C-alpha cells in the first residue's frame, strides 16, 4: 500500500508541477485583429492605436508580453490622468482577453493533453494517495501524528502550501492574464458544457470541484465508520458538482442566465445588482422563476430550514465554501483558534460584514428603483469595495489560502454574511442543538481540538450544557471523535434547548428547579 501511495504522490506532483509551469509555455504575438475582436466598440479605435508598437512582435513569455502591454496601456492612461481628462481614461482591463488571443503555445493547440497531465494526473495521484491510506486499519477516526506533521501543524510544508494557495488566488482575481495557458487547457470542457470558451472562473470552478471530489474520497475513507459523515460528504460533492458547476454551465448552453440555485444572498452578494435583476427579468419565465426562487430562499427557506435543522442544512451539507473546508480543509481543522479573544473578534467581524452587505443591498435596490444619481455613485463605490475586500480578498485569498495557518473555516467563521444570518436564526429560533452528557465526559479535549469553528466544546460537555452557539455548523465531527458518546446532534422541541445552569453529572441525573 505504501508503494501505491508513493506512486500517487509522484503523479500528483507531476500534475501540480506542470500546472505551475504553464505560464512559461509558448510565445505571444499581438495583431490588430486581436485588439479589434476583443475590446468594446467605444475603445476599439483608440486601443488599436495604443498597441500599434506591439503588432507583429514575438514575446517569449507572458511576463515580457504583459510588461510591454502594461507599459503601453499605462502610458496612455497616465497622460490623460495628468491632464485630468477622466472621461477619456480607459478603465477596462483588456489584458486577459488579449493575452488569450495573442498566445501561441502547445497548450492552446493540444488542450486535452495538458488537461490530462495537469488535472488528470493530479486527480489520479490524489486518489491513489488517499484510497489506501486507511486500508487494514480498524474502524474509527484516526488523527495520528497531526501535531508532528509538517503539513498539518504549521510546519514548513503547510506554510509552503498556504503561500501557494494565496498566490494562486491573488493571480486568479487580479492578474488572470498569467493564467492564459491554464484557461486554454479547460476551454474544450467549457465548450462542451456551455458552448463558450473558458474564463478564469471556469478554470477555478473546475479545480474547485475536482478538489472537493478527490478530498471527498479521503473523507469517505477517514470517516468510513460514521454514516452521518459519509452522507454529509456525499451531499457537498453532489451540490458542488451538480448545482454549482454543471447546471449553471448547461443553462448558458440553453441560452438561459447563468444561475447557481443553491447560492443565497447575502453570500451571493450581487444577486440584487442591477445587471443581474435586468438579466433575470428579461429572460422570460425561467428568469423570473430564478428571481423568485432566490427571494423565497432568503425570506422563507433560510428561516424555515434553519428552524428545523440549524445552519448545518446549508453550511455542512450544501454550501460550496463549506464543502471545500470540510474536504480539502479537513487536515487543518485543528488549527482553529479556540480562545475567548478569537470568539470576540469573530462576532464583531462577521456581523459587521452582514451589516455592510445589508446596507449595500438596500442602497442598491433604492438606486435601482429611483435611479438617483448621487446615490448611484455611492452604490457603485460600495460594490467595488465589497467585491474587492470581501468577495475577493476575504472570501478567496484569506478564506482558502489561510487553511494551513488558521484552520479550515476562516471565511465561514469570520466573514460569511450568510453564515451570520443563519447563525442568528439558529441561536434564537431553532430546534437544533448539540446535547451533552457531562457525567460521561473524561475531558480528553478531542471535541474542542477538532472543532473547526473555534468552539471550546469541552467547556460545555464538562457542564452538561447544550451547545447552541450561532457559529456551530453542525458538522458533527465533535460527536464523531468523542470516545464516550457524550455529544449528540439533535433536532427537538425548543423548550429546554438552552440550559444555562450546569449539570455536572449528566443531563438526566439531576433535576434543577429554577
Image (cartoon, helix red, strand yellow):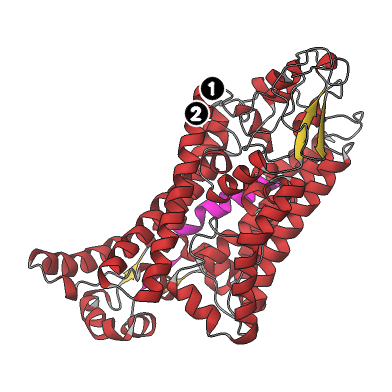
Q: Could you tell whether 485 is left or right of 20 in the image?
A: right
Q: Which mark is residue 344?
A: 2
Residue 351 location (% of width, % of height): 49, 42
Q: Which mark is residue 122?
A: none
Measuring 92% from the left and 28% from the top, which residue is drawn there?
138
Q: Are marks 1 and 2 in contact (CB under 8 Å)?
A: yes
The crowd level at tag 1 (other Cα within 10 Å; few <14, some 14-19, many 20+) is few
What's the distance in space between the residues labelled 1 and 2, CA to CA?
6 Å
Measuring 84% from the left and 45% from the top, which residue is drawn there?
230
Report the magenta residues as a range.
11-29
Q: Which mark is residue 340?
A: 1
Q: Element type at marker 1? A: helix
Q: Is residue 110 visible?
A: yes
Q: Is residue 303 above or below residue 111?
A: above
Q: Could you tell whether 151 is left or right of 397 in the image?
A: right
Q: Could you tell whether 1 is left or right of 415 in the image?
A: right
Label count reads: 2
The crowd level at tag 2 (other Cα within 10 Å; few <14, some 14-19, many 20+) is few
Residue farthest toward the left in the current orientation of the protein: 83
Q: Is residue 188 visible?
A: no
Q: Element type at marker 2? A: helix
Residue 430 location (% of width, % of height): 72, 43
Q: Is residue 499 above or below residue 78?
A: above
Who is closer to the viewer here, 257 or 210? Answer: 257
Q: Within the magenta stretch, is there residue 12?
A: yes
Residue 84 location (% of width, % of height): 10, 67
Amino acid at each position: 500500500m505504501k508503494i501505491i501511495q508513493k506512486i500517487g504522490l509522484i503523479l500528483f506532483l507531476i500534475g501540480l508541477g506542470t500546472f505551475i509551469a504553464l505560464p512559461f509555455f509558448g510565445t505571444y504575438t499581438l495583431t490588430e485583429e486581436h485588439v479589434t475582436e476583443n475590446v468594446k466598440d467605444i475603445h476599439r479605435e483608440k486601443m488599436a492605436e495604443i498597441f500599434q508598437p506591439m503588432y507583429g512582435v514575438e514575446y517569449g513569455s507572458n511576463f515580457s508580453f504583459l510588461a510591454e502591454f502594461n507599459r503601453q496601456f499605462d502610458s496612455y492612461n497616465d497622460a490623460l490622468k495628468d491632464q485630468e481628462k477622466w472621461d477619456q481614461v480607459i478603465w477596462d482591463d483588456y489584458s486577459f482577453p488579449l493575452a488569450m488571443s495573442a498566445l501561441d503555445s502547445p497548450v492552446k493547440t493540444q488542450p486535452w493533453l495538458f488537461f490530462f497531465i495537469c488535472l488528470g494526473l493530479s486527480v489520479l495521484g490524489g486518489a491513489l494517495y488517499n484510497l489506501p491510506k486507511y486500508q487494514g486499519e480498524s474502524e474509527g477516526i484516526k488523527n495520528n501524528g497531526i501535531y508532528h506533521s509538517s503539513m498539518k501543524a504549521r510546519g514548513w510544508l503547510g506554510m509552503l502550501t498556504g503561500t501557494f494557495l494565496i498566490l494562486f488566488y491573488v493571480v486568479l482575481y487580479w492578474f488572470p492574464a498569467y493564467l492564459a495557458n491554464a484557461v486554454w487547457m479547460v476551454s474544450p470542457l467549457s465548450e462542451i458544457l456551455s458552448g463558450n470558451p473558458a474564463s478564469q472562473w471556469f478554470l477555478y470552478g473546475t479545480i474547485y470541484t475536482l478538489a472537493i471530489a478527490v478530498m471527498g474520497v479521503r473523507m469517505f475513507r477517514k470517516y468510513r465508520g460514521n454514516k452521518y459523515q459519509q452522507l454529509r460528504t456525499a451531499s457537498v460533492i453532489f451540490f458542488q458538482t451538480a448545482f454549482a458547476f454543471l447546471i449553471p454551465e448547461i443553462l448558458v448552453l440553453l441560452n438561459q442566465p447563468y444561475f447557481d440555485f443553491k447560492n443565497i444572498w447575502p453570500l451571493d452578494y450581487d444577486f440584487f445588482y442591477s445587471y443581474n435583476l435586468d438579466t433575470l427579468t428579461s429572460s422570460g419565465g425561467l428568469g423570473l422563476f430564478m428571481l423568485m426562487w432566490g427571494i423565497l430562499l432568503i425570506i422563507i427557506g433560510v428561516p424555515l430550514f434553519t428552524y428545523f435543522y440549524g445552519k448545518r442544512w446549508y453550511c455542512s451539507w450544501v454550501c460550496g465554501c463549506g464543502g471545500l473546508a470540510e474536504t480539502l480543509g479537513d487536515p487543518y481543522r485543528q488549527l482553529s483558534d479556540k480562545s475567548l479573544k478569537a470568539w470576540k473578534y469573530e462576532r464583531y467581524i462577521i456581523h459587521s460584514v452582514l451589516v455592510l452587505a445589508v446596507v449595500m443591498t438596500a442602497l442598491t435596490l433604492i438606486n435601482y428603483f429611483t435611479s438617483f444619481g448621487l446615490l448611484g455613485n455611492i452604490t457603485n463605490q460600495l460594490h467595488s469595495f465589497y467585491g474587492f475586500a470581501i468577495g475577493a480578498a476575504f472570501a478567496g485569498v484569506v478564506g482558502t489560502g489561510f487553511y494551513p495557518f488558521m484552520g479550515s473555516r476562516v471565511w465561514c467563521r469570520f466573514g460569511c454574511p450568510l453564515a451570520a444570518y443563519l447563525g442568528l436564526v439558529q441561536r434564537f429560533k431553532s430546534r437544533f442543538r448539540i446535547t451533552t452528557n457531562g457525567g460521561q465526559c473524561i475531558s480528553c479535549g478531542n471535541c474542542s481540538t477538532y472543532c473547526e469553528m473555534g468552539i471550546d466544546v469541552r467547556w460545555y460537555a464538562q457542564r452538561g450544557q447544550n451547545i447552541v452557539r450561532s457559529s456551530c455548523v453542525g458538522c458533527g465531527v465533535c460527536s464523531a471523535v468523542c470516545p464516550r458518546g457524550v455529544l449528540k446532534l439533535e433536532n427537538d422541541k425548543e423548550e429546554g434547548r438552552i440550559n444555562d445552569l450546569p449539570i455536572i453529572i449528566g443531563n438526566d441525573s439531576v433535576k434543577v428547579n429554577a
